[in-house]
Image (tube, rainbow, N blue to C red):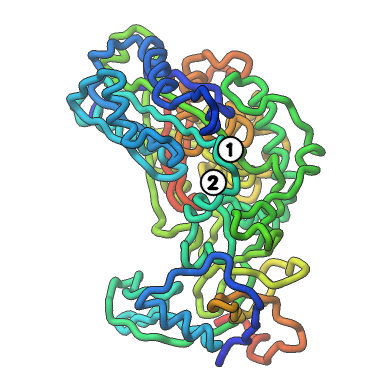
Amino acid sequence: MPKAVAILGAAALPVGKWQTPSDSPTQLLEHEVLASLVVDATRDGGVERTDIGSLAFSLPRPYTQQKYFGTFMANYLRLPCGACVSETMGNGMTAGLAFEAACNEIRLGRTKVALALGINFETATSAAEHMMRSMRTTGDVDFHVPFGFTPISWYAMDAARYIHEFKSSREELASVAVKNRRHASLNPLAQFRKPITLEEVLSQAPIVEPLGLYEVPPRSDGAVCLVLADEDVARASGRPYVRIRGRGFYHEGAHQINEIPNDMIALLAARTAGRSAYEEAGVTPEDIDLAEVYAPCTIIEVLVSEALGFAPRGKGAAMAKAGETTLGGRIPICTSGGLQSRGHPAYVTPFYSFVEVMDQLRNRAGQRQVQNARLAVTSAELGNYNAALVHVFEAVQ
Amino acid sequence: MNLPVISIGRKRSFPPRVTAHTERFWRSLENGQFETSQCNDCGKKTFPPKPFCPHCWSKDLTWAPLGRFGRLYSQTVIHAAPAVFRSEAPYRVCIVDLDEGLRLATLLMADQPPVLDARLEIVALRYLDGPLFAARPLPHSSHLVSELLPPS
């Protein structure tokens, strides 16, 4: 029987612009920032440094000068590890996969405590240079990129198809951005906290039609350290903790588009991974108190809310517009502010989702606290949600 | 020649890499031929062309012509473009479902956004340094009788 895994503690850098330009006389460097979070997170989790047997890092951006960052950090922290030290990469799912790597060391009984951690610094690199890399992360470099596709252009085509098929509207989709900004206004870790109106969202410059500036993710820096432990350790700590109750993963064997025409906006991977996670957790979507989903654009939050069973097919946007996914609504989604407003330091973004869920389930989310939150769901993805990683978490007091 | 050919008086912004296998595809495209790999074992076509069959993993493949007609599954206009495409922005791109049951993504040559599910055709683009392809709405006048039939 694999060991049950708990999140015991965490520390996170507020999402924002932190990276210093390369010509700045004084630099803010990734290892110093992350080491400080490691110290804070272990204190939050009440564990000793000698308890830690595994470090699972998300890969930093290529702009981080210190390469082989994970093994360098083991040195910088002077932390011998008997289970594993690893550095994981998987685009937007990167931090989700690092989280899994840490969990698996505990599940296999190789260590009782593991850290899942990482840093994503990128904002000192210009958008033009960054996009020359990011355009090659989606689709086919030889059969898509020559036409100028960008990562979010695929989501924009999801939006066009959704509006067409379900007679939705840009206004309905844009309401998600307004809701997320409101949530972010209550989150000290969020990058953009000034509330915005629907009119302001609709009047922004178009980025990838029909989506404008506030409906797509910003570029962001961020860093997180999570303390994971065998549930026995968590229980013995006498502190409230969060237990992983279910997990699901599915890759549909496609990247961006399926060469055999399919229903692109059904998000088959999220549906399948969600079903596995609910099944393992022994719960249904109706049992869930909040969801912190990986949704770079407004449309994706809508599609994921449908794929994970929080809204009937084609009704997710109308449901968001009606306030059902806002704090105080039927099923609050992205109480952190989501990727548009909490920010999107891509390789660590799923870590921030776990932090939000931990804060909510430990009843320390302050003004954005979901009352009596007991069960929460997270998701992470690859491509155009061609792969999904879904977790169900439970509060243990 | 099964594709209309349009000459473009400049080089491609981000040329595709050519392999020993895909060289045939690009050379044919330059000459207005749209074709792809087809499996001799299971009979299925695949796009982009591949040196193996992704459906049954056979390595016994042949080249087969690909029909140029399809419908518009989705589209967008990209305003925020990577450096190499900046001079072209804003530009329209799309996902096309070919009548032969294959989905691809490409440029959409249209001044106005066609309604989704509209009929499209693939055209060859002959740049100064090599070919690409694109989709464009079918003008009413050029509808062939076969085009008015539902996709098989």
Can you tell which of label 1 and label 2 is closer to the viewer?
2
Tell me where residue A225 appears, x and y as whole percent.
Answer: 40, 23
Q: Quadrant of the N terminus of chain A?
A: top left
Mark 2, chain letter? A
Instruction: Mark yes or no: residue B66 visible.
Output: no
Most foreground residue, A336 or A372: A336
Which of the 4 quarters of the picture holds residue B36? bottom left
Could you tell whether A233 is left or right of A287 in the image? left
Q: Amino acid at mark 1?
A: Arg
Residue A349: x, y in percent?
A: 49, 34
Task: Give the x, y percent position of residue B131.
Answer: 54, 78
| Crowd band around label 2 with a 10 angstrom C-alpha radius: few (<14), some (14–19), many (20+) | some
| Camera-side residue of A236 and A218 | A218
Numbered mark located on residue A76 in the image: none
* Residue placed under numbered mark 1 in the picture: A219
Q: Which mark is residue A130?
A: 2
Element type at mark 2: helix
Q: Quadrant of residue A329?
A: top right
